[in-house]
Amino acid sequence: MTGKEEYILDVRNEEEWNNGHLDQAVNIPHGKLLNENIPFNKEDKIYVHCQSGVRSSIAVGILENKGFENVVNIREGYQDFPESLK
């Protein structure tokens, strides 16, 4: 992944991901963000979500500490996404 792109990062666990996810999302559970290679550039815009907004808030802090400059927390979480997106 190159350039200033926009991505959706789903930080829910594997079971939640397997139960449904956005087609365009990339899944890295929030507990793995410290040690995982993040497949985005530091300048990319990254929209982060979890199930309800708690883990995504933590994930945003982790990404910012790793130098990612344009991270957005989707506070509502997957549970509040319209069915048409799921």
Image: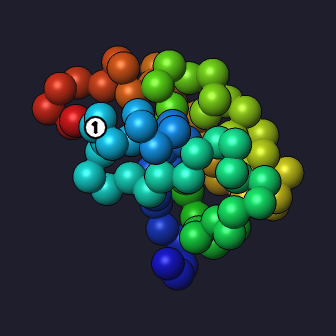
Q: Can the viewer see residue 28?
A: yes
Q: Label 1, on which residue?
A: 20
Q: Residue lying at the far bottom in this picture: please name it.
A: 2
Q: Is residue 45 above or below residue 62?
A: below
**Label 1 residue SS:** loop
Position of 32 with respect to 12 (left or right) is right
Q: Residue lying at the far right in this picture: please name it.
A: 65
Instruction: Tell me residue 25's x, y (percent).
Output: 38, 53
Q: Can the viewer see residue 48?
A: no
Q: Foreground residue, 30 or 73?
A: 30
Identify the residue at horizontal 46%, vertical 44% (top origin): 14
- How packed mark 1 is, by other alpha carbons closer than 10 Å (few <14, some 14-19, many 20 or more), is few
Q: Residue lying at the far front in this picture: please name it.
A: 15
Identify the residue at horizontal 26%, vertical 52% (top origin): 23
- Colour scheme shown: rainbow
Identify the residue at horizontal 36%, vertical 20% (top origin): 79
Q: Is residue 63 above or below residue 75?
A: below
Instruction: Tell me residue 75's x, y (percent).
Output: 54, 23
Name the amino acid type tagged 1. Gly
Position of 45 with respect to 35 (left or right) is left
